[in-house]
Amino acid sequence: MADYSKEEIKRIEEKWRNEWRQRGVYRVENQSDKPKYYVLDMFPYPSGAGLHVGHPLGYIASDIVARFKRLKGFNVLHPMGFDAFGLPAEQYAIDHGIHPAVSTAQNIHNFKNQLEKIGFCYDWSREVQTCDPKYYKWTQWIFLQIFDSWFNRAKGKAERIDELVKIFERNGNVDHPFPNTKFLVPGLEKEVFSASEWKSFDEKVVQEILMQYRLAYLAYTDVNWCEALGTVLANDEVINGVSYRGGFPVVRKQMRQWSLRITEYADRLLSGLGQIDFSDSMKEIQRNWIGKSVGARITFKVKAEAGEQKNLVVFTTRPDTIFGVDFMVLAPEHELVKEITSETQAGDVEKYLKYVESRSEIDRMAEVKKITGAFTGAYALNPFNGREIPIWISEYVLAGYGTGAIMAVPCGDERDHKFAKHFNLPITNIIGKHYNGVEANPTKDAILENSDFLNGIVMHTAIDVVVNRLEEEGIGKRQVNYKMRDAGWSRQRYWGEPFPVVYHEDIPYAMSEADLPLELPKSNNFKSAGNGEGPLANLKEWVFFEPGKKRDTNTMPTHAGAAWYFLRYADPHNDKEFAARKALDYWNQVDVYIGGSEHAVAHLLYSRLWVKILHDLGYLNFDEPFKKLINQGKITGDSRFVYRIRGTNKFVSAGLKDQYETDPLHVDVNMVTGLELDTEVFRHWKPDFHNAEFILENGKYICGAAIEKMSKSYFNVVNPDDIIENYGADTLRMYEMFLGPLEVSKPWNTNGIDGVFKFLRRIWNLFHTTSGEFLVTEDEPAPAELKALHKALKKVEYDIDHYSFNTTVSELMICSNELSSLKCNKRSILEPLIIALAPYAPHITEELWEKLG
RNA sequence: GCCAAAGUGGCGGAACUGGUAGACGCGCACGACUCAAAAUCGUGUAUCUUCGGAUGUGUGGGUUCGAUUCCCACCUUUGGUACCA
């Protein structure tokens, strides 16, 4: 009786969703005889805009994998949750006066409703929300574990801070020098102290020293300060000198901030890439971000005019070019600048420093190629032959990298070369014919000339020769540098995890576990408290909760909650531990993680870091969180434009727009069919357009088109609910997979959706007579039928391992076509077919399965 | 600039390790059903062609009996990055 009609689809899909929910069929236990499999989606930030058709792409893929593995006999963990702390909710609160907790809860509710309709097999009993105190209690707890540890370089792993205290009590810090010599401890004269000195230090000095070692530490650091947002941003939240969100200017500012010492893990984060299955480009992005470079630190003596001897230390990856050094360059902020500048050059240097100070980050970014600098009047001496080398200062040398000073080799380095040409400095050629006098040549294959004891040696072998000599003579040593900085972990924001520490005499102490969570206090004031302090600083009673004690007024970044949520899913309701060890050991690493590539440098690095630290401290038996990562492509929007003739309410069709002076306006894609605008609907869209006039071509108004990101403000958002309303969730799921390879970005269009819908109907019709009666026979299968079936089954199995879902859909279509033309309605063929189809189209297959009995 | 990935019909895209290029779907054309239309079903559909064939996977070369696939150079697009010594 039943057709695969709109009404029938709605009935079937609702029926099964209710059934699944009521019977709790997707609830999974933490123990089983079956092998485990963990399929994870990057949990979404619940924005107010709701879900668009781009969001479910990855979720559908992971759902197919989860359902497939379950059918294959695995105990599958497939959870979902919400990354619910964050800036947009707070910005929304400022703009609309709605508390972030309220808008976030509302948004999560909407997201869940939308997700529910797509028929995912999530175990919702394991849902996590990062803004839930029961959850962030453990975010805070993990933060305290990080605070309570240091990185033992000798062992290459994190240890408890009391281990370090024991070492100091025995030997002082001779074997474990300060990780970063730039942060000096007030009241401590030298960088090395003995055991007896350690015991003589007062509490303040002791705590300051330990702070220099902690993996979560407080320090005055240069941060990216965004005045408009009133907060500090991480490096990855700043793009071209403006904020990632909003595009506001960002300046450098010194503030006392929490940081995570991720730099200590640079090498392990790098080598760990070898054990995990991420795409090559993803690994490359992480490698570039970490930016390891191997070279040497070389000490040049500064030619003394009078007084004490000064040294200038540089970092270089090319020690082999030491005899080609024609000048030195210091960063303008370098501490030596003031000490070495000669009287005659003082004016020039002063002027240049003023100029540098006047330049904003954006100016510097915009004029990267502009060559500026000033001569200090001082000279350095080449450590091998004593040649006098002029010392310059210039912006192109960055204070924050290496030693903030370089040895410049113009014949081999492009920037040095341009600098030399610009200021007319002599250029020594050490690479013979490889240098043409016009352009620097960074080759490592040249045979060295004009290079003293290196003459006649090929450059790449000369590197070792020089470094050995430097080390022998005590003028330099091997050194590895990283581009990656420690991760700023404080945000001057309300809607985040408060830091679980209490300040006493300005020293932060960890709160005890029993007092966690430190709940975010209720407040309706989200404005920053001024001078760099966040909104929490407005709550005096909360901040100064006891005489002599003070809380931190910052909150953690969104990355904090997201850095470990995949661990919580193993045991989400535990209130004694962040997750029971047994559950963690059982579910272990995420087998497949599906999400966008935009998280390459932030979320994925922080997650890897937290897991490594927890592993080192003995809480986990694995040290990489994600075995395999798949990056689904973005689904972009296909925008439509109308062209308004400037200063009028007349709109001209795209083909004729060049005859007028026009401004393009986005129009809602839902009022355009193909490229043709429904002018009546357009007139009613906004009051402004009520009296709009149109200049048509061939009786039609043709719109312009562009592929852009899907966004409310471009009116190009397609809501999955509308697709489900018209075709059902099964068609949406299959169509999103059919659209193309999972990992490729592609524009959304519904051009092909009918084909997918027809396929499902054909499947339905195989089980039904033309009059709609359910009819399946017990007849023996024919060879042609078996061949069609097994060809498809083979493809389904093969493709799932290659995440090639689009070709599976094609293959299933071929199979259904063949069976349809063979008029096959035999149980022995149809039963295996719908099992293979089940992960893709769970509703229709459940229905047919039930009818099969 | 540097790093990475990718360029295949009118469109989205197939082609597993070098072996019949264009699967599957859309679109289009024709046909069936219909008074008609829609829907549905069927057939055809890379390009050129003197109907023999010829040419075709961004461009130009190369390796090979054979190349969408491997190598070199270039062009274009997308993503990452931004003076990192």
Image (cartoon, rainbow, N blue to C red):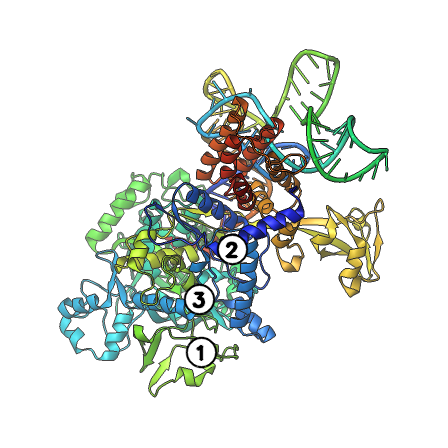
Q: Are marks 1 and 3 in contact (CB under 8 Å)?
A: no
Q: Residue A742: x percent and y percent? A: 52, 43
Q: Residue A104: x percent and y percent? A: 53, 68
The CA span between labels 1 and 2 is 49 Å
User: Foreground residue, A216 or A800?
Assistant: A800
Q: Earlier in the sequence, mark 2 or mark 3?
A: 2
Q: Closer to the observer: label 1 or label 3? A: 1
User: Foreground residue, A824 or A334?
Assistant: A824
Name the mark on residue A369: 2
- Tell me, yes or no, whether dots 1 and 3 are on the same chain: yes
Mark 1 element type: loop
User: Foreground residue, A39 or A597?
Assistant: A39
Quarter of the image holding residue A512? bottom left
Q: On the image, numbered disc 1 is attached to which residue?
A: A521
Q: Closer to the observer: label 1 or label 2? A: 1
Is disc 3 surrounded by few (<14), some (14 to 19) or many (20+) residues within 10 Å? many
Q: What kind of residue is marked 2?
A: Lys
Residue A829 in the image: above or below residue A2: above
**Subunit of mark 2?**
A
Q: Residue A775: x percent and y percent? A: 59, 35
- Tell me, yes or no, whether dots 2 and 3 are on the same chain: yes
Mark 2 element type: loop
The CA span between labels 1 and 3 is 17 Å
Q: Earlier in the sequence, mark 1 or mark 3?
A: 1
Residue A631 in the image: above or below residue A665: above
Q: On the image, numbered disc 3 is attached to which residue?
A: A557
**Subunit of mark 1?**
A
Q: Residue A329: x percent and y percent? A: 39, 59
Mark 3 element type: loop
Quarter of the image holding residue A546? bottom left
